[in-house]
């Protein structure tokens, strides 16, 4: 590689794993991942709107400006296409930019840089240069933020060759997957989620706790039906699984995808082979979405094992309305997921 | 509703500090009476906006308003004066900080409050909320939520006016933060290239969320950016109602009759945080806010009115009428019904589209039908 790419290397990470963990929020877990990676590798830097002085629109980057200074925690103007694209260029020069897009909705403004630039770099230039860029952004709905601010289009992005798309559903994975993204050689979107930022969980303190990309997790074991979800839909699915056990004696298994591209079809298929039934859940619009992809993969991998058609639950196919009652009606809430499960099981 | 629909604010030529050559004394008296009435109407509108915003904050804190709620307290002068310079057939397009613009354009306060409450009599039928007010009849084509997203739309509205042969112009509001998004540059270039009747109003309230203009813009004198497109740009004191009126009237007139686009930067200050959820103190000092509040644009106009000969009582009455309008707005909003749940999917497509979607139904996996057609409320 030519001179500019030979920028300072990452420091060697300590060899031993420690087993200590601490209870913290999803937001704090992301912050911990950023701090650890910035301390480990000086090529890592953060940029985005309000990430510095304001400490992040959702306070993920609180304290980082004070710790790492304005060179590495860069406030940007409202120029998503510009600074995300700047991330692409800096990554091509061997830097490890982490670009925060305040919410997923504003990524649309920069979509050309994501899909037609970042995702294309490695293949289009014959594998001679990569783009180790991380884009972090929260998606989701449920706070009456209305049509332009309540979207989950990770499905579009997960359908783009050249990109990797991760979607942690709990604090431990938030830390582990963000670290995996930062250490990865390719452009990775880490999809965060507004309602989960405040969720708490045990997070390994080991700086080498990295969640592998392309590996789903069995978030809850069960035998009667498989619920497949990611991000906030996993949280809801877990809630539904508990209700099903209590009210109907149904044992539901929940597969948390964690990674949308690459997708761990194997774990999903193994679970469905075991339970013979699947309900796929997402926060986004299901037509042409993540659940559409899952349904296709499941019917192909598990055709002989299925006892019922694969069901899917997602956002009502409308731009999200403001009124609370309408918004609630549109969301893939626990009642709708539960109803889909019962229907798939033939319980009325 | 007692509040005037639109400011009858006197046009530049009649304003007292602009000498009009050889005006006979009678006409002069009439002109100043008219100017006084216009200023009083503006004063009432400014109070309407201020009191409406204060009420919106209370209602938000009482959880009757949700989502994002961006208040415009402190920005009333430029709002009222710029909208006051619009004519009936002009078109208004704004960003999401739009309560004041809607009220200034004459949208009934009750319809605005009902929208914030998410009720069916809201100006967007409870679908849009605080950021997406509109009133098609009054030529207000919306508050838009993506920073700078309204600029190409507004530019196209100006093109629409031209194609329809209208002698009218577009007033397109944006914040200081919006000048750094690509759409700003693309829109201004189009407007200049195609000679579109549009005035881009930059409401420079000194901050875009927690980022000051100095920290966001390499050329902090934002109006200068117009020069890159050989477009006229100018900056006015946005808290001086006469200055904004004069400039907005002149620029909109030129846009209407000569199809000359322009940038008008109004420098003002946002008293409250970015939205109700932001205390607004992490990036600026209490002293700064207090100092700016001492220059309050409403009080400033009040003093000016007294100088012009208004009675203190008239000022108090204007404020009382505004207060009454806000109280009535809340009552109207409270009484308006919630939108019907079975109408969830209404308005996503134009009438008649059902036929086109019909054949998505039969083969759909269970549940998809409801999702696509918006029933989706149980089985
Ligand atoms: C493209 C885009 N990026 C980010 C945001 C989030 N956001 C909403 S308002 C805002 C600040 C805008 O400031 P300014 O244009 O000065 O308007 P003001 O809020 O002061 O009225 C930001 C960053 C957005 N809505 N759209």
Image (tube, rainbow, N blue to C red):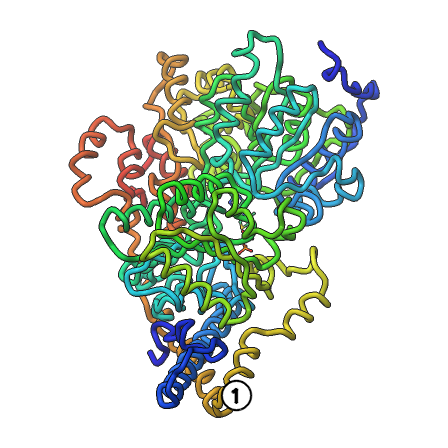
Identify the image quadrant of the C terminus of chain A: top left
Above-or-below relation of B174 to B246? above
Left or right: where B89 falls relative to B174: left
Relative depth, front residue between A59 and B109: B109
Q: Residue at x 41, y 73 (%)?
A: B13
Above-or-below relation of B265 to A249? below
Left or right: where B270 falls relative to B160: right
Determine the secondary structure under disc 1: helix
Image coords of residue B329 (percent x, y): 38, 73
Q: Does any portion of residue B44 appear in the rendered image?
A: no
Relative depth, front residue between B252 and A10: B252
Q: Residue at x 36, y 38 (%)?
A: A339
Image coords of residue A20 (percent x, y): 79, 31
Write down the residue under mark 1. Answer: B306
Q: Does any portion of residue A287 appear in the rendered image?
A: yes
Image coords of residue A250 (percent x, y): 44, 33
Above-or-below relation of B38 to B130? below
Identify the image quadrant of the N terminus of chain A: top right
- Occupied quadrant, residue A17: top right
Q: How many marks?
A: 1
Relative depth, front residue between A282 and B74: B74
Relative depth, front residue between A196 and B245: B245
Q: Residue at x 28, y 39 (%)?
A: B370
């Amino acid at each position: 590689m030519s001179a500019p790419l030979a920028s300072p290397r990452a420091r060697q990470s300590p060899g031993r794993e420690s087993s200590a963990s601490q209870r913290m929020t999803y937001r704090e877990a992301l912050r911990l991942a950023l701090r650890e990676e910035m301390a480990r590798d000086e090529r890592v830097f953060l940029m985005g709107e309000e990430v510095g002085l304001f400490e992040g629109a959702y306070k993920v980057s609180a304290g980082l400006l004070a710790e790492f200074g304005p060179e590495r925690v860069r406030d940007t103007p409202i120029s998503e296409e510009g600074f995300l694209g700047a991330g692409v260029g800096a990554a091509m020069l061997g830097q490890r930019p982490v670009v925060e897009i305040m919410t997923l909705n504003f990524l649309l403004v920069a979509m050309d840089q994501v899909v037609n630039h970042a995702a294309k770099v490695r293949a289009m230039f014959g594998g001679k240069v990569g783009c180790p860029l991380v884009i972090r952004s929260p998606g989701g709905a449920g706070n009456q933020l209305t049509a332009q601010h309540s979207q989950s289009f990770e499905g579009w992005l997960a359908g783009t060759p050249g990109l990797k798309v991760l979607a942690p559903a709990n604090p431990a994975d938030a830390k582990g997957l963000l670290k995996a993204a930062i250490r990865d050689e390719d452009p990775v979107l880490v999809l965060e989620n507004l309602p989960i930022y405040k969720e708490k969980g045990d997070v390994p303190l080991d700086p080498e706790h990295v969640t592998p990309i392309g590996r789903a997790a069995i978030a809850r074991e069960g035998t009667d039906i498989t619920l497949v979800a990611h991000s906030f839909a996993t949280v809801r699915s877990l809630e539904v699984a508990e209700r099903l056990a209590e009210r109907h004696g149904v044992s539901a298994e929940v597969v948390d995808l964690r990674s949308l591209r690459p997708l761990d079809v194997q774990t999903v298929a193994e679970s469905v082979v075991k339970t013979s039934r699947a309900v796929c859940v997402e926060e986004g619009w299901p037509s042409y979405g993540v659940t559409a992809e899952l349904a296709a993969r499941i019917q192909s991998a598990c055709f002989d094992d299925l006892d019922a058609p694969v069901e899917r639950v997602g956002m009502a196919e409308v731009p999200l309305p403001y009124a609370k009652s309408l918004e609630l009606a549109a969301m893939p809430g626990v009642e709708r997921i539960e109803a889909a499960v019962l229907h798939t099981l033939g319980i009325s | 509703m007692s509040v005037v629909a639109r400011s009858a604010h006197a046009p530049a030529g009649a304003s007292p500090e602009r000498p009009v050559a050889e005006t006979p004394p009678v006409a002069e008296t009439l002109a100043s009476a008219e100017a006084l009435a216009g200023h009083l109407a503006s004063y009432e509108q400014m109070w309407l906006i201020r009191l409406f915003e204060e009420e919106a904050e209370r209602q938000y804190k009482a959880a009757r308003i949700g989502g994002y709620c961006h208040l415009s307290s402190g920005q009333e002068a430029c709002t009222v004066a710029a909208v006051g310079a619009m004519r009936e057939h002009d078109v208004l397009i704004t960003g999401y900080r739009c309560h004041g613009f809607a009220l200034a354009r004459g949208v009934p306060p009750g319809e605005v409050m009902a929208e914030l409450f998410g009720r069916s009599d809201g100006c967007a039928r409870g679908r849009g909320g605080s950021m997406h007010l509109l009133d098609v009849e009054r030529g207000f084509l919306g508050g838009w939520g993506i920073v700078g997203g309204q600029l190409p739309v507004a530019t196209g509205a100006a093109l629409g006016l031209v194609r329809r042969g209208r002698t009218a112009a577009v007033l397109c509001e944006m914040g200081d933060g919006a000048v750094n998004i690509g759409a700003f540059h693309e829109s201004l270039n189009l407007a200049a290239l195609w000679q579109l009747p549009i005035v881009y109003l930059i409401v420079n309230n000194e901050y875009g969320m927690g980022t000051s203009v100095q920290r966001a813009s390499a050329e902090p004198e934002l109006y200068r950016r117009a020069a890159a497109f050989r477009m006229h740009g100018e900056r006015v004191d946005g808290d001086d109602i006469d200055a904004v009126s004069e400039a907005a009237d002149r620029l909109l007139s030129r846009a209407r009759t000569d199809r000359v686009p322009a940038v008008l930067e109004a420098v003002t200050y946002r008293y409250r945080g970015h939205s109700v959820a932001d205390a607004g103190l992490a990036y600026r000092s209490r002293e700064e806010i207090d100092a700016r509040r001492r220059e309050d644009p409403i009080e400033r106009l009040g003093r000016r009115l007294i100088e012009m000969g208004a009675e203190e009582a008239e000022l108090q009455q204007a404020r009382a009428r505004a207060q009454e309008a806000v109280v009535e707005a809340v009552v109207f909003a409270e009484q308006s019904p919630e939108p019907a749940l079975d109408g969830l999917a209404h308005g996503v497509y134009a009438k008649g589209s059902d036929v086109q979607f019909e054949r998505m139904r039969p083969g759909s996996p269970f549940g998809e039908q409801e999702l696509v057609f918006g029933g989706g409320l149980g089985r």
